Image (cartoon, grey):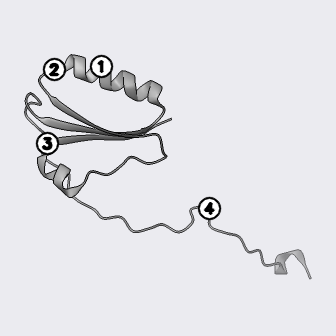
């Protein structure tokens, strides 16, 4: 078989993409004083503890709620938590 007749099979490195529900961005808050803001952060506690401490110190009038895990994905808010939340900080820290 000549080199130009060879057929190569390869796998797509992207893999299979799962569908994602799209939703529009929420409007910006004009102030965060008195608002309920959730942390849903996973990963290294070294980073998340310092971030949480700094934000709580800089914004003492905010009602901060925390949902932490040391797994690989942030924990989503429950529908009840979403109803009362004004904002969400969701991240993965390694």
Report how far apart the C-alphas of labels 1 and 3 lie in the structure. 20 Å
How crowded pointer 3 is (Cα within 10 Å; few <14, some 14-19, many 20+) is rated as some
* Quadrant of the frame with the N terminus: bottom right
How crowded pointer 1 is (Cα within 10 Å; few <14, some 14-19, many 20+) is rated as few
**Residue 34 position within the rendered picture, expressed as x and y whole percent measured from the top left:** 7, 30
In the structure shown, which secondary structural element does the residue marked by tag 1 occupy? helix
The residue pinned by badge 4 equals: 13
Which comes sooner in the sequence, label 1 or label 4? 4
Q: Where residue 54 is drawn, which disc sits there?
A: 1
Which residue is nearer to you in this view: 94 or 23?
A: 94
Q: Nearer the viewer, mark 1 or mark 4?
A: 1
In the structure shown, which secondary structural element does the residue marked by tag 2 occupy? loop
**Residue 86 position within the rendered picture, expressed as x and y whole percent measured from the top left:** 14, 42
Asked if disc 2 and disc 4 are in contact, CB closer than 8 Å, the reply is: no
Residue at x 28%, y 62% (from the top left corner): 22
- In the displayed structure image, the side of residue 72 where residue 3 appears, left or right: right
Which comes sooner in the sequence, label 1 or label 3? 1
In the structure shown, which secondary structural element does the residue marked by tag 4 occupy? loop
The residue pinned by badge 3 equals: 86
Which comes sooner in the sequence, label 3 or label 4? 4
Q: Nearer the viewer, mark 3 or mark 4?
A: 3
Rendered view: 68 above or below 16: above
Rendered view: 74 above or below 7: above
- In the displayed structure image, the side of residue 84 where residue 12 appears, left or right: right
């Amino acid at each position: 078989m000549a080199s130009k007749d060879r057929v190569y099979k390869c796998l797509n490195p992207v893999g299979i993409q799962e569908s994602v529900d799209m939703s529009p961005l929420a409007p910006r808050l004009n102030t965060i004083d008195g608002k309920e803001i959730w942390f849903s952060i996973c990963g290294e506690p070294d980073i998340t503890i310092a971030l949480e401490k700094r934000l709580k110190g800089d914004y003492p009038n905010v009602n901060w709620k925390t949902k932490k895990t040391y797994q690989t994905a942030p924990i989503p808010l429950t529908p009840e938590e979403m109803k009362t939340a004004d904002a969400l900080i969701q991240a993965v820290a390694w």
